[in-house]
């Protein structure tokens, strides 16, 4: 009986580790420094390029002022490119005690590399320049 219980716990632990989404959690106080880190994967490039956006830097500073060092900003790659959708869907926000709050939604095209902001009101992906013009 004890062996069966141990086996079930092991199976439960293994199944919980099989997530489909990729996350990268960083404290908001650790916004990238002036030097550019070495980019190893496309996901690294996505994270670094999004963190370099002025809007994200301002958001991190604002979040830091509200929550302090407890705030953890988080990236979630919720979808990877497919034939139908040739882009990554990236959510950026923060984790609170027990949940994720998505503040920004980006579509990232790997070839050629381009980041677009997804406007949920208009249900369309727009360029970063257009996003800035609209004042979001």
Image (spheres, rainbow, N blue to C red):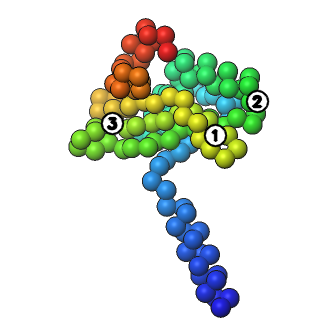
Q: Position of residue 49 (x, y in %)?
A: 48, 27
Left or right: 81, with 53 as reference point: left
Viewer can see residue 73: yes
Assess whether mark 2 and mark 3 are in contact (beta carbons under 8 angstroms): no
Q: Which x, y percent locates residue 29?
A: 70, 29
Q: Residue at x 39, y 13 (%)?
A: 130
Q: 39 or 28, which is in the foreground?
A: 28
Task: Name the residue tied to disc 1.
Answer: 95
Between the residue at mark 1 and the residue at mark 3, the CA separation in whole angstroms equals 24 Å
Residue 68 marker: 2
SS label for mark 1:
strand
User: Considering the numbered disc 2 on the image, is that residue within a helix, a strand or a loop?
Assistant: helix
Q: Earlier in the sequence, mark 3 or mark 2?
A: 2
> Which callout, 1 or 3, points to the residue nearer the camera?
1
Image point (55%, 63%), residue name: 16
Q: Give the label on residue 87, or none.
A: 3
Q: Residues within 10 Å of mark 1 (few under 14, many from 20)?
A: some
Res 57 label: none
């Amino acid at each position: 009986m004890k062996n069966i219980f141990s086996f079930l716990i092991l199976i439960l632990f293994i199944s919980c580790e099989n997530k489909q989404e990729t996350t990268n959690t960083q404290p908001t106080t650790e916004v990238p420094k002036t030097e550019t880190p070495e980019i190893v994967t496309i996901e690294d490039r996505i994270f670094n390029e999004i963190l370099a956006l002025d809007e994200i830097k301002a958001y991190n500073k604002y979040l830091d002022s509200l929550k302090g060092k407890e705030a953890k900003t988080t990236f979630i790659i919720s979808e990877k490119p497919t034939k139908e959708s040739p882009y990554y869907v990236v959510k950026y926000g923060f984790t609170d005690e027990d949940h994720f709050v998505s503040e920004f939604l980006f579509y990232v095209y790997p070839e050629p590399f381009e980041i677009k902001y997804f406007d949920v009101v208009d249900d369309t992906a727009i360029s970063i320049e257009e996003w800035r013009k609209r004042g979001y």
